[in-house]
Amino acid sequence: MFAIDPLLESVDGSAVLIVLLKVVVAFAALMIAVMAMVWFERKVVARMQNRLGPNVAGPFGILQTLADGVKLFFKEDLLPREADRPVFRLAPYLSLVPAFLVFVVVPLGGDFSNDRHGVVSWFGKETLVQVADPHIGILFVLAMSSMAVYGVMLAGWSSGSKYPLLGSVRAAAQMISYEAALGLSLLAVLLNSGSLSTNEIVSGQSGWNWNLWATGVVPFIVFFIAATAELNRPPFDLVEAEQELVGGFHTEYSSLRFALFFLAEFMNTITMSAVIVTLFLGGPNGPSFGPGWLQAILPTVWFLAKLLVFLFVFVWLRGTLPRLRYDQLMDLGWKLLIPLALGWFLLLAAFKIGQDEGWNRAVVGVVGTVVILLGALLISMAVGTARARRAAVEVEA
Amino acid sequence: MSVSDIERLDAAVARLAADDSVLRLSETEAERRSGYQADTERMIMNMGPQHPSTHGVLRLVLELEGELIVRSKPVIGYLHTGMEKTGEVLTYVQGPTNVTRMDYASPLFNELVFSLATETLLGIEVPERAQWIRMLMCEVNRLSSHLLFMATNGMDLGAVSMMLYGWREREELLRFFEKVTGLRMNHNYIRPGGVAADLPDGWRDDLRSILDALPDRLDEFDTLMSGQPIWQDRLQGVGVITAEEAIALGATGPILRSTGFAWDLRRDQPYLRYDEVDFDVIVGTHGDSFDRYAIRLGEIHESMRILRQILDRMPTGDYRIQDKKVTPPPRARIDESMEALIHHFKIFTEGFKVPEGEVYVAVESPRGELGCYLVSDGGPKPYRMHIRGPSFVNLQTLPHLMRNSLIADTVAIVSSVDPIMGEVDR
């Protein structure tokens, strides 16, 4: 029942070549996408703020990222005296590599309608339009995004400086707490699709049966907020927080090492958007029409279009919202998102069991909602009690 | 002020002295104990003088417990320019050029307070039109200063778009300044005896178009900021101070008004023609950063109200006093009149003599009570010039406002106090 890349059923020379080609193309595409994303973000945010944005390097300033990269490349690479050198040098790669790896499990194209599982035919070989499709696809995504925390945390810690240290402490707390919300909201999707493989998840969403509404929107919202926090993007960019911590974890970094962090950040934004599209918006699923060549590229076009929506929303958030404070961020994560995701998951699970056992849907709905509301009441009471107790302590002191 | 008021003030002073929020460490000691202290589990950290959100070169020495600020100490002096001392070697004619550079976000108030002090010593009253022009320019300056606050306050809290919106609006006002005074800042426009030049043609249209455009933009600020839950969470209940504490620390301006204490020199010690225009003194209730933000937003509206009245009531007449000893003659007269040539020469070389005496004059700058204390020994230069900079005095409240807050709050609090370091260090 698990979709395995049909290419790997019989491995020969051309199959190896196709795999290599896929790796190279995915790598190049991601690099170009990052370049374009940096330009896109700067341009869009500039327009939102009544500015022109980059407009000198190349047409519409599209080569600005390249120019910045070249500039950073020629800058002196400073190593602080107090830094823990091996870790300081290692950290940027720890942050960059996972960002790359997440991308390999994202299906980028292929026809998923009529149970075709996105299989396409290249050079006479049947294959999937994704670099790899492991059975544990989504767990791999979670694992890699957790790995990325190490890059940020170790960078701050090894800098031997106070602002980066504070940044890395924030990073550790923030990313670990939001990882929980991220995982819990993801459970709803897994419940719906019954598989961890990204290909299966996308196949399950063919024909407008997107997880976005199949799971009732709530997991999508929780996942999106948690993903924003996981990415350290505004309004959750406390880890960098230029106005508070100067540059946060990368304050002491310069030259190419800084560029690597910068790249990783934008790469993460793209890959996380791709993951959201895969999980909730049906990946490359979309209406198909026109001649054969158009039908072949349409799924990829749909995928990119959906991706672009999220990239724009991320930029939009940056242009609109002030930054949260550390404790407010924790409150939001632990007291709202995690209980919400968990409650919703339980409700969905109840419906699922009800379906299997043939229970009355309305009864399941009512009972489930009552139980969830009761839970919400208990949680809010617990939070209220804790707050009152803290206030009492403050009055005494 | 009744006895119970004084008792309440005394209690506030005692409370402030006892709250142990000021880090009393010398800089050398702070340097020595920099880093993590195993015995107290605290860390001393410097914020500034080079830091993106300390508004120039303010340095805060913070004693942290995790991210919680236990004690703190503002360190100043990184922008010391000796302007007060310079004031003693410049004539009263040159004075405004010097003082205008102190609070560079509201230069016209500096010029105004210096000119008013000089005029009080001289015992002269400037013509009616000059009074109204001064009022007009100061209120426009209050707008531009508060808009700058809106911009930096937004930026400090991570709402970077707000920075550019605030600056966009301020730009239009600076353009108006440029048209009237020739410069965007450091105008040297208000001088002892009146103002440097009459308002240019078309100033009414320029001002009207600004006043017509601004309210919509302010509504946008309201939508973007005031109603935004994250914004409210970040500012409400942050940096709280009571009226008594604010008075005990000498804080004025939006900080004092945010506590609900309605003190505005424009109303309580009217100068210029503020007693002839209608405006409200905006006060807060909680004394927190949000109130200080909201007060400034409200004051922008009030300033626009004043400006509309000025537009209607601007009198005609001289824009500077016709006193040959104080006001230089028009350029054309110098070619015709020997006397005019002599006056011109005397005013621009020696300056005019000011009778012996001392005076303190205060105006309501966007940051609070801006005072100028002048001592004259009868010569053409002040014997002593002292400026009571509201930013300097307001800085005193910082350790108390920041007690038990997070690093992120520090930024919000410094921003809401809105210090201009040029005025702090003078």
Image (spheres, grey):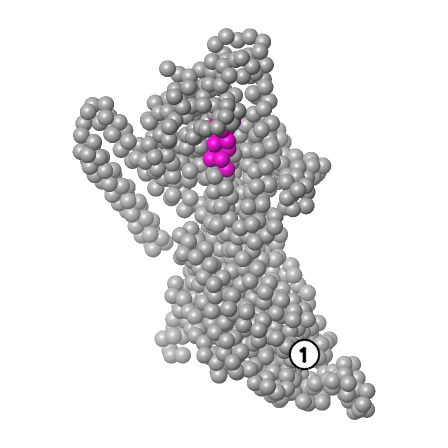
Q: B293 above or below A182?
A: below
Amino acid type assigned to the residue bearing label 1 in the image: Ala
Give residue A275's position: percent from left, percent from top: 46, 30
- Residue tagged by mark 1? B196
Query: Over which residues does the magenta segment extend?
Result: A296-308
Residue at position x 55%, y 46% in the image = A44
Q: Dot 1 surroundings within 10 Å: few (below 14), some, or many (20 or more)?
A: some
Instruction: Determine whether, in the image, residue B203 is placed left or right of residue A116.
Output: right
| Image quadrant occupied by the N terminus of chain A | top left
Instruction: Determine whether, in the image, residue A204 is placed left or right of residue A107.
Output: left
Closest to the observer, A31 or B88? A31
Closest to the observer, A150 or B64? A150
> Magenta segment, principal secondary structure?
helix
Q: Give the SS element for disc 1.
A: loop
Residue at position x 38%, y 21% in the image = A114
Residue at position x 54%, y 59% in the image = B166
Residue B109 in sight: no
